[in-house]
Amino acid sequence: MTQKNNHSDQPGPWALVTGASAGIGAEFCRQLAAQGYQLVLVARRADKLQALADELKNAYNAHSLVITADLSQKDASGIIAERLEQEDIRIEYLVNNAGYGLPGSFHVPGWQDHADFIQVMMTAVCELTWRLLPGMRERGRGFIVNVASVAGLVAPSAGHTLYGASKSFLIKFSEALALENEQNGVKVCALCPGFTYSEFHDVNGTREMISQLPEFLWLDAKDVVSDTIRAMSADKVRTVVIPGRQYKAIVFANRYLPWLAAILSRRTAKHFRVTDSH
């Protein structure tokens, strides 16, 4: 599950990013490395992680610990934490980014598919945070970014049933965690991007469908990450970070014109949600 290297003597601080192999996760790694962080890279694809580790070393002289892990496995977070302890690595910046979409109506996939989804999207986030948070509190400094989504803030639609629900959970979890730790030097936020250029829709097989969306709805991962890092460095952190004016407007409409948001969600969902009536 892991690639063994001795990194305990490398200068800190250290950041850990799950889902680091591509998209928003990889961009977090690049921008944190540019700020002087050493990286713990976590994902399932060892070749992608090693390529990123080499890139970070060449571009920023950043050291990386590569941990290949499948967060759908119940022991994954514990194994990651054990590896960090072995290497004497103390995480200051945690980005819970790993995630995916499960297309279709709720009754169609097998229960194990749903169980794996819940494990990755919610349980693993909570467990890894629970394991790393005490060290941050003891040191009086830390950053936790839980990558949620605008889907957790707007009216639901048919299809991908657990996706928006899981993101709503991450938002509430982050808000409560921020309140609990605001006096302990640990800053927490839920990042809520909209549609972002990445491999996300290739992985869940909806690229052709999602490509029908207008260009103005798309965000660049670089902008999403830079907005978040800037927000986290502020004296008073915004617990919910929504990149892009277009998505701020969408969330505003959902909050103050919920009837209109519900109508628009039902009408536009066919362009980005897969359902199955069987």
Image (cartoon, helix red, strand yellow):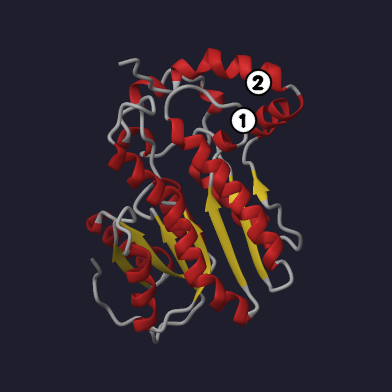
Q: Do the residues labelled 1 and 2 touch (CB within 8 Å)?
A: yes
**From the image, which quarter does the N terminus lie in?**
bottom left
Residue type (three-letter) at the residue carrying disc 2: Ala
Residue under pointer 1: 154
Residue at point 48%, 55% (across, down): 28
Horizontal relation, residue 172 to residue 55: left or right: right
Q: Is mark 2 on a helix, strand or loop?
A: helix
Q: Nearest the camera: 242 or 52?
A: 242
Circle nearer the N terminus (1, 2)? 1
Residue at point 44%, 59% (across, down): 29
Q: Can residue 86 be seen in this view?
A: yes
Residue at point 62%, 41% (across, down): 243
**Residue 21 percent coordinates (x, y):** 34, 53
Q: In this view, does 48 lie above or below 258?
A: below
Q: Nearest the camera: 151 or 245?
A: 151
For the residues labelled 1 and 2, the Cα–Cα distance comes to 7 Å
Residue under pointer 2: 261
Residue type (three-letter) at the residue carrying disc 1: Val
Q: Nearest the camera: 101 or 104?
A: 104
**Residue 226 percent coordinates (x, y):** 58, 51
**From the image, which quarter does the C terminus lie in?**
top left
Instruction: Give the total number of marks visible in the rendering.
Output: 2
**Residue 88 percent coordinates (x, y):** 41, 84
Quarter residue 276 falls in: top left
Which numbered dot is residue 83?
Answer: none
Residue at point 50%, 64% (across, down): 129
